[in-house]
Amino acid sequence: MHSNRLFLVPFLLNIGLLLPNYMQAQLVNMEETWQEFLGNQKTSNVSKLVKPEKSQPANYIKYSLMYANSYFCADNLPSADKMMREIESMGTAVQDKVPGFKERYELMKVKIKAYKDLVPIWQRFLNDKSSVTRKDIAAVPEAKTVCEKGTLCKFFYMTAHAYYCEANLKDARNHFENRVLKLAKTSFDPKSVEGLNEEIEMMKSLWAGIDALNPVWTKFIETDQSPGFETDIPVIGCYTVPNIKVCLLKAAADFCNTGSEMLAKIKELQASMSHDVPGDVADKIAWLEAEVNKSDQGLANLNSIWAKFTPKEKLPSGAQYEHVFICDRSAEVKAYLMDGLSNPCTEGQNALDSIARIRKDHQPSLDDVTTSKLKKLKNLVSNEAAELTKLNKAWEDFLPDNKLSGKADFGYEYCDKAAVAKAYTMDGILNICERGQQRLDDLEKLKAEYSPELTSKTTAKIDFLQKEVARLTQEAADLKKAWDYLLANKEVSKDLEYEHEFMCNREGDVQSYLLDGFTNPCQSGQYALDEAQKVIDKYNPNLSSATQTQLNQLKARLKNENQNLAQLNKTWKDFVPDEKLSSDLDIVFEYCDKIAQARSYIIDGTVNFCEKGEQRVKDIYKLREDYLLTLDSETEDKLESLENKVKQAAKDLEDVGAAWDLYVATDTIMSWTEGYPAVDTVVRHQIRLVDFYCDKIAQTKSWVIKGLLDPCEKGDAYLAKINNLKRKHGLSYDNDLACQVRRLEGKAYQCKYWTLVREARRVTHLERETFGPKSAQIMYGELNSDKQPCETTVEYEPLGYIGVRYIVAPHLCQKTNLAKMGDPEYYKKIATWVDNEVLSKYCEASMRCKEDFFIYLEGHTDGYRFSGRKYDQSLDIPDGTPYTHFLGNKDGTVDTLQKATRHITRELKSNMELGIARAWTVKSQLDFMKVPITIGAYEHPETEKGGEFRKIDIELNITNLLLDFYEKTLKRLVKESGIGERPSSGC
């Protein structure tokens, strides 16, 4: 233990002596490195430095700054940031004490900021390379001065790319190769920066491709010959000229397979950049575009024409097409085939020669249609002479009798159009039923298009064909007309002629024999059936249902003649007694026994008189004339009866026409508003009408007249008949008849309407007779009281159909001063009563009931002699006031005079003026009611004296009191009756 201590003391002494020397050495090394660091901004060797303590602040911040720089240059930004934070933690005071520190410290911060500022630009570049320009990169100029290689590499790569986008390939390549690639060859690994390594590899391929492209393109421009180009050049969308050149080289080397594809790709590449392509490139693009369009359009045009040509081997009007198609040699074959087949006589051989050359040089694949057309063209060209020989041989065989001894073995297409005419003519005559008219049409077309020179023999045969076709056509038309007449009329026309042999339609033979049979079944029916059967056995024609039906009918006609006669005799027996049938008519109308046939006509004409009566009379007379018939007496009687009916029907028709003219001229009233339409008492005795007319219009006119004669009793019944007949037969009236039907409708309506008017008036009158007396009694009670010295009477009277009249008569039982006569309240009671007890009961909001409301005042004087009167106040009755003067006589009669007053003031001169004064005084009290008021005076004779004759009659005339009540009642009755609206009147 002591021995160790003895050893330790000298050791510690030595350490203590050595330590200051060591520390001094470290301080010297730190200072030398710092000075070297200040003089050289490149990374310094600081690995030998010992990290000072923070107690040595100057050395600590020097150490931290040098190591921050070292870490930054070594691409270790986290450690560099850590060192910078250490410096910040020491504060700024110590920085000021170290010479040169602050400048290098600020520079370090700028470099780190440049590093960080470039990061988002790089990210934007990776996302969208066209979004970063040189201006964006230049916004971080410090980035190109940093020692951090990742930042330098990104800066110069983006710069190179930007120059490329500007089409500055020289500077783009310089920055890439002399900056980016050199940095990549140092210890810096591009893979450490996201996306950088891929971008560098891409641009390497780009420049390698461009180096390979340039000589090939130059040679292509000089020679117009392209060897193609297989090297892949990356596409940078902002500048695609190299890629466009590649597309042009490929298109030129293999135009048919790649031309259209490369042109489309070029359009895409052009759309992605904003630069104009160089002139040589633009020229080649224009060349490629023209060639592609020419090839596509030319081929499309040819294929369209070919599709229209192939069915009939005829070119569309104005068709034009190319003959060279380097990408589709089969199209060239089609072009020459259309030349040859359109005009084989002049272009056939040339077309075949051209096709042979194409097939030898290019071996195109031909489809079935093209192969077939080529074969046909070869045949046309090589076989013309042989075909003409065959045709001429057939022609010579045909000339004598229009027949061939063997089978027709010739064609219809020749360069010699006269030969074509021969072929058409022979075919038309030999097959005249199937193709006669068609070959005539073909010949006309041939003449119009080629104007061939025809021999006289050919012309003669064409004339023969025309005549035969015309003859056969006319014969068929004649037969059809006769046949259609038979079907429509059930008999054969005597005026239409027809043949009996129809080589083109053997059904016509059968129809012609049937026409013969139906013309006279009794004489020629069986012969016609035999001949028709021969035709059927020999030719087996396909008979239509109509022909078969007529054939069956003729057979049945001949077979059933006896049965038909038996049926007719039975029907005749049923008909003779009353000229009616007990069942439906079921007989035929043609018999070998012409007496029987005449009877069938009589029955038919009588039973179906309107449709056939007149015609059947004519048919019987023609039958008698044709067959010199003598009818038995019974048949003669029935014929005479039918004739009489026909004559009578004509007479009936004439009479109804005369009746119509007379009635229309006599009865001209068009509307009815009051009362029932008058019953005719004149016309009915001058006309003759019957119950039935065959003519529906005549029938309608007779019913119209009958309805108008008695419209209220019979109008509706005849209108129903008229409407049913019109609807059943679809009749259409002329203006005169339509007018009279409307008049009948109007008259019939007025009959029903006026009945409803009368009922409405009756109901209204009952209402009035209930209300009027009651309301008068109420007024009587209101006007008579203990305060009234004299009685006032109130009487009710009906006025017209809807009005009422109340006569309020205050009696003058004592002498009364006229100036003071009457209490205003008395007259207000009258007005109030009128409003509340009369008008309010029946008047509606429109107050129409008050229209024509007027008051008449009549002053009565008894028979005492007038002794004169004077008044303190003036009555002021104007001069010329109109009034009615009633003057009573002893014998009870009354004279009525219309007069006008003098100007009456305070003095009265007669009983008449006294009566006027009494009326005028009341008028003054009632003027407030605002209704018209007239006055009158009644002088009673001397035999009528006393208070009962001294009075004033106040007549309240409410003319339209029950107007609304009446109209509502009428409207309800009209609705309930169902007669509807009044028909329109007039014609």
Image (cartoon, rainbow, N blue to C red):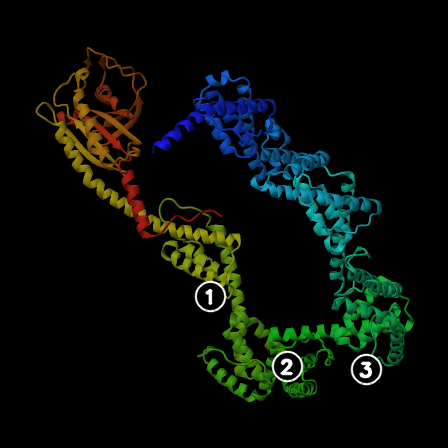
Residue bearing the label numbered 1: 692
Question: What residue type is disc 2 on?
Answer: Phe
In this rendering, position of residue 401 left or right of residue 152: right
Is residue 139 visible to us here? Answer: no
> How dense is the environment of label 2, judged by Cα within 10 Å: few (below 14), some, or many (20 and up)?
many
Is residue 457 visible to us here? Answer: yes
Residue 600's quadrant in the figure?
bottom right
Looking at the rendered image, the disc whose residue lies closer to the viewer, 1 or 3, is 3
Q: Name the spot of residue 533 as percent of width and height, x first.
A: 66, 87
Residue bearing the label numbered 3: 407
Q: Name the spot of residue 653 as percent of width and height, x first.
A: 52, 63
What secondary structure is found at the residue carrying circle 1? loop
Mark positioned earlier in the residue sequence (2 or 1) = 2
Furthest residue toward left? 786
Tell me if residue 342 comes above or below residue 75 in the rendering. below
In this rendering, position of residue 126 left or right of residue 930: right
Question: What residue type is disc 1 on?
Answer: Phe
Residue bearing the label numbered 2: 518
State the CA–CA distance, disc 2 to disc 3: 43 Å
| Residue at screen point 64% across, 73% down | 485
Tell me if residue 155 comes above or below residue 670 in the rendering. above
| Residue at screen point 68% across, 45% down | 205
